Amino acid sequence: MRTRAVALPTLTLVTGLAACDASARPQPSAVAPAPLISSAPPTTTPSTAGSWDGWEIGAHPLPRRPDGFGEVESTPVALRNRVLPTRDSLPPPADGEYTSAISEVPADVLARSTWQAGCPVDRTRLRYLTMAFWGFDGRAHTGEMLVNASVAQDVTQVFGRLFAARFPIEEMRVTRADELDAAPTGDGNNTSAFVCRPVRGQPNWSAHAYGLAVDLDPFCNPYSRGDLVLPELASAYLDRSWRRPGMILPGDATVRAFSAIGWSWGGKWVSPTDRMHFSATGT
């Protein structure tokens, strides 16, 4: 990812994309907006929604902008009410209850992560977490995450609260090194923490590079600044009045859970607005 700072254009393109996506959203008689948090698994599943059929995640590279990000495009119909099922890479919890584990980072996990000798946190200061979560498919799954050792216990407690609230998460896995240089596709939705990268559009290290930040359901909670939206196909989710599973809204269970451990939410920022982002550092 390029790290030079650039002057970004006005909000015109974002506004136009959001309006285009909002105009295509289902009418209440067709698809009722789903509640953010419920006491039961999400009622809208891929088997009933069907709108995700035919869309293959990561299969549609976007042309790059001068700043290195992908071109922002209107959200495909298949992803405007995103409820894709989770593909298990770890065994799901056997009893459907919340389970978590904290350990030193296994060598094979470190090797496929973004950590390298130049990162601002030593590998011995990272911890490997496995945690249960509810998918958009209404099933319990097990995810993985790298975080700073100083926040490992707190993070497992947060995701325990989200599990109890049945907040849906599509994917939770360690970000791979090759993803940092891969062509942008704008349709990812991986919940992750440690990523050895700078702040978007800046030369200084991100809180993610220290393992002190979590991005939660990024497609459902996009980053926006000027005409930039990340992920680049997530413009439909700039409309926060249309509540869909996986969205983070002020005062909800996600914000309260992270606030309880002293973390702040980027959804409160004005420019950029980083709706997916929670951090221990405030940045």
Image: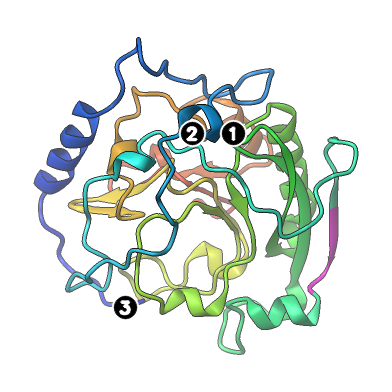
Q: Is residue 57 above or below residue 249?
A: below
Residue 196, position in %: x, y?
A: 53, 74
Residue 258, position in %: x, y?
A: 62, 39
Q: Which residue is mark 2?
A: 248
- Relative to the observer, which residue lies in front, 129 or 255? 129
Picture quarter with the N terminus: bottom left
| Cβ–Cβ under 8 Å for marks 2 and 1 | yes
Q: For the residue labelled by badge 2, is the local secondary structure a helix, a strand or a loop?
A: loop
Residue 144, position in %: x, y?
A: 71, 59
Protein image colouring: rainbow
Work out how far the residue at label 1 is from the one at label 3, CA to CA, in angstroms: 31 Å
Q: Quadrant of residue 110?
A: bottom right
- Hey, what amino acid is under mark 3? Arg
- Relative to the observer, which residue lies in front, 181 or 135? 135
Q: Is residue 95 above or below residue 11?
A: above
Q: Which residue is mark 3?
A: 2
The part of the chain drawn in magenta is: 101-105
Q: Residue at x 68, y 29 (%)?
A: 166
Residue 153, position in %: x, y?
A: 80, 51
The label shown at residue 254 is 1
